[in-house]
Amino acid sequence: MLLDRSRHTAGTTTLIGVVLLALNLRAAIAALSPLLPDVQADLGLSNVTAGLLTTLPVLCFGLFAPVATLLGRWIGGRPALLAAMVGIVLGSAVRTVPGMWWMLVGTVLIGIAITIGNVLVPAVVKQDFALRQGTVTALTTAALTGGAALAAGVAAPLAQTALGWQGAQLMVGGLAVVAAVVWAPQLRHRHTTVAVPAGGPSVLTSPVTWALATIMGTQSLVYYALLAWLPALLRDGGVSAADAGLALGLFNLLGIATAVATPVLAARLIDQRRLGVAVGAVWAAGLAGLLVAPAWYLLWAAVTGLAQGAGIGLALALIVLRARNSQSARRLSGTVQFIGYLMGAAGPLLFGMLYDASAGWSVPLAALVLASVTMAAAGYRAGRDRPV
């Protein structure tokens, strides 16, 4: 009886810790966006450098995903996740030091730290919550999305106080301090897992891995492209700055609901092929709506917002569901995110290049519709009950 109660308490503590970890996996990035005008004015940054501050973290998500996988193997997932929270705190502090280079260094530190969390949180879910992996993945995905919305919402008001933009950055970074304090006791727990030889078959040999990487890549590409360009697209169509901001807010906030629902639904289904096709189809419908009926932009912002939450929720859920065990989940997560986030980092750049080349928004929007169709096809392939 006491042993069962102890295990229940440990499981609850781990769950709270995992959710707090996830809360920090976008917050420090999202908080910088509304502060960029102040940062540019204070540090004298060019538009190119300011744009780099939003692109660098996504590049880190891809480039350092294999490193995060190795770090989890070398020191263990729990210590690595604690180090990730420390990295977010340090990066947030470094970004407050005067000078452009310190801002870039701090941004890279934050990007690397978040990458560790991106890769290793699914492995912890697979290891500790095998019987509730859909529900826990839903909670972590919701925390990730909600943390970004919360940070974006409070950063500007905080910056208007005596704290300034530097203090606002530190306050958001303080969320990682809370997560680190709650997570630190996890280092005392030992968990038995199924051993997987380091020299075993590479996850790259599985077609499922490539289907998962395509889902992660296309949903990241479409999401980051729309996140970066939706306000400009709407402003060019005659929408006011306030209404364009409302549309962007809908796009971000409505994703929380589907980020919660999609992993739970995916875990209850033996076969997720129809779900994968549906997520890509909703993305395509919302983007096509912006293309052919832009006057209904709030509706399309809502549709794409629901799609983006479902997209990241499905991608993370399928990584957990398709992995055989926690070691496999760690390797699969690192590989899928390496490929996927490199594609995602290219989204805003490619969208802008297509806009410049075509002198309009039709061609870049059509390209995003095509990416969504590709996402649906990959969802059908990865949705089959076939472990990596």
Image (cartoon, grey):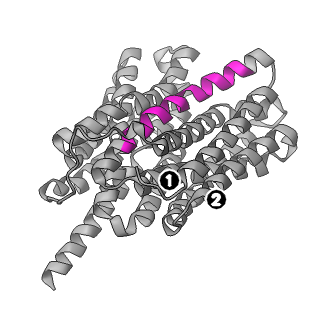
Looking at the rendered structure, the kind of residue marked 1 is Gly
Question: Who's the residue at 49% across and 39% down the image?
Answer: 210
Q: Which residue is mark 1?
A: 146
Looking at the rendered structure, the kind of residue marked 2 is Arg
On screen, residue 317 versus residue 180, left or right, reads: right
Q: Residues within 10 Å of mark 2 (few under 14, many from 20)?
A: some
User: How far across and how far down the image is residue 295, in percent?
Assistant: 87, 43
Residue 243 badge:
none
Determine if residue 178 is in view. no
User: How far across and how far down the image is residue 45, in percent?
Assistant: 51, 15
User: How far across and how far down the image is residue 144, in percent?
Assistant: 46, 50
Tell me whether circle 1 and circle 2 mark residues in contact (CB < 8 Å).
no
Q: Which residue is mark 2?
A: 274
The answer to which quarter of the image holds residue 369 is: top right
The answer to which quarter of the image holds residue 297 is: top right
Question: In the rendered image of this protein, does residue 364 appear above or below residue 201?
Answer: above
**Numbered marks: total:** 2
- SS category of the residue bearing label 1: helix
Q: Please state, as top left, top right, bottom left or bottom right, where the N terminus lies in the image.
A: bottom left
Mark nearer the N terminus (1 vs 2): 1
Question: Who's the residue at 20% across and 73% down the image?
Answer: 7
Determine if residue 239 is in view. yes
Q: Residues within 10 Å of mark 1 (few under 14, many from 20)?
A: many
Looking at the rendering, the stretch of residues picked out in magenta corresponds to: 332-354
134 in the magenta segment: no
Q: Residue furthest bottom?
A: 1
> Which mark is in front, 1 or 2?
2
Q: How many angstroms separate mark 1 from mark 2 (CA)?
A: 27 Å
Between 160 and 14, the one nearer to me in the picture = 14
